[in-house]
Image (cartoon, rainbow, N blue to C red):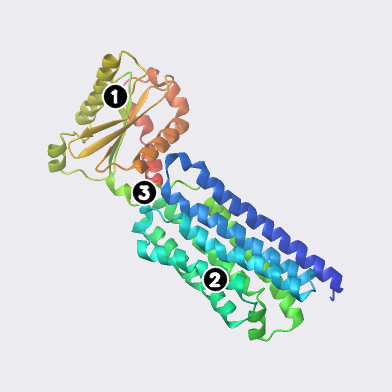
Amino acid sequence: MVFPPSAVVELKFVVTLGVILVGWEIGAYFIYQYFRTREQHVEYNRVLLGYGFLLILGYFCLLIITFDDLFITDPEFSAVFLKIGYAAVLSSPLILWGFTYVPQFKNILHPNLHRFLILKSFIPILTTILFPISTPLFNAGMALIFIDTIFLLVLQIKFIQLSVAEIKKRFLMITLGEILLMVSMLFGAELFMTVLNVGEDLAFNLYFVGLFIMFIGELVTFFAVLDFPPILELKWQDSLVKLVIINQRSNNCIFSYDFIEVPDSYETETHLKLEKGDKNKLFSGGILGIDSIIAAITDTKEEKIKKIKQGEAFIFLEYGSDIIPLTYALVIKEEFESARYFLRALKRQFESFYREILSNLDQIKGNEDIFFSSFDIIVNNMV
């Protein structure tokens, strides 16, 4: 079937615009996810901010190229118009490397390499502005974007290697989404079509194949960033020792979970009793006893202790509501803010999953922990 020229133009523009709008929404959602956790000082989540601008500026350039290809006939205006699009997409690596140039990222990229990437990012922008399109210097500047592509993949591979559980899975999905987006761009590249020596009709069909692959890449990327968990620190899970949930009214431990097998020497050094049974009860009583002392000293029941340092270990504490009077204690070997966020997430999951049982907790006599034993499956999935 042969479409009239006007129908071809309209079809290409409408479909491309639809894909671009989806890409912009995903880019905006990346930025939203960063600001959602900004108050928690989640520095590693700056990478989401960089990804957001990469998508927004990249799709802006695609819109410029599409509009120029379909509607602009004046060569001089076309050159200026394309320069705006190229400058926009070439500035996105500068934004990414600039946003992520903070001390936390020295574990991911060496500071000297990071500075090199920032300074190098100015070169393509300047060559795009100063030199005519398709000249050797212009093309050389454009080629430098491949360096950013390589190190963007290196950045993501490092995150995948150093992260675990949900964050590792999300970065794998983001990487897959970006690979699909890069592959899709080849189907719309005039140079690629020339190398393949394809006819006009086949090139037209391949263009829409590329848009379809791009849309699949967008879907993968969207599900990767949906409710993205904060990246506070890396390898913080290695510091986890034990979780204990205490019923404040009965002074009983209703759930405990050992993240590691605690050696006797560690217990002796830290004076923490971290085994099952009576030792859990002693641990529970100690936590609640400290709370009572704090309340007596401050003459208020509202004052709650949030952290205890005991020997070489730390204990983070969170509390349930008056309706659900629980104390959540997380023992860790090193102080990580990620552990605090993890404990709060555990609290939300526990109270949500067992809400009905917890509302009738006072009616349970003895062996309370039997009702909550399945929570270890949720803890395993969250680590």
Callout 1 secondary element = strand
Q: Quadrant of residue 342?
A: top left
Q: Amino acid at mark 3?
A: Glu
> x, y (%) of residue 42?
42, 45
Callout 2 secondary element = helix
The label shown at residue 124 is 2
10 Å crowding of disc 1: few (<14), some (14-19), many (20+): many
The answer to which of 42 and 293 lies nearer the viewer is 42
The label shown at residue 187 is none
Q: Amino acid at mark 1?
A: Asn
> x, y (%) of residue 374?
38, 38
> How many callouts does the rendering have?
3
Q: Nearer the viewer, mark 2 or mark 3?
A: 2
10 Å crowding of disc 3: few (<14), some (14-19), many (20+): some
Would you say the residues marked 2 and 1 are in contact, meaning their CB atoms lie under 8 Å apart?
no
Name the residue rendered at 23%, 26% in the picture.
Answer: 281
Q: Nearer the viewer, mark 1 or mark 3?
A: 3
> x, y (%) of residue 306?
32, 29
Is 242 situated above or below 224? Answer: above
Residue tagged 3: 233
Name the residue rendered at 46%, 63% in the picture.
Answer: 118
The answer to which of 325 and 72 lies nearer the viewer is 72
Asked if residue 330 can be seen in this view, the reply is: yes
